[in-house]
Image: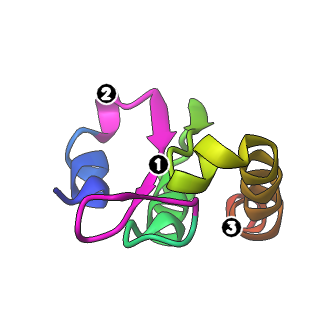
Amino acid sequence: MDPLAIIREYQSLVNCVHYKDMYTDGRWAALGEGNIDMDAITKELRDSNFEGWIIVEDECDEAITNPDQVTLNAGAYVEKVMRPLLNN
């Protein structure tokens, strides 16, 4: 599956995007650590003047054992990586 291609194809219908990262073997990854190109998706949303919601979910293994830290890490990723991309 290519999330970026799907967003481009159905752009007029997209009003909510669910960010969730994964490795190529299908295991869930912490946000920004997997193979999903979050930067490209974020830039596409920005460039298409997306005005909907972006929801972040993390189901990596660490989310089970240390959910508070995973939440903090995801928030830091959003602030450090995603917000600057959206504000360009």
Mark 3 and mark 1: span between their CA atoms?
17 Å
Figure check: 19 above or below 81: above
Q: Is residue 64 above or below residue 86?
A: above
Q: Earlier in the sequence, mark 2 or mark 3?
A: 2
Q: Is residue 22 left or right of residue 67?
A: left
Quarter of the rendering occupied by the C terminus: bottom right
Which of the 4 image quarters holds residue 55?
A: top right
Q: In this view, does 59 lie to the left or right of 14?
A: right
Does the magenta portion include 54?
A: no
* SS at mark 2 in the image: helix
The front one of 82 and 70 is 70
Residue shown at 25% from the left, 59% from the top: 26
Q: Quadrant of residue 32?
A: bottom right
Q: Give the range drawn in magenta.
A: 11-31
Identify the element where label 1 is drawn. loop
Amino acid at dot 3: Leu
Which residue in the protein does label 1 denote?
20
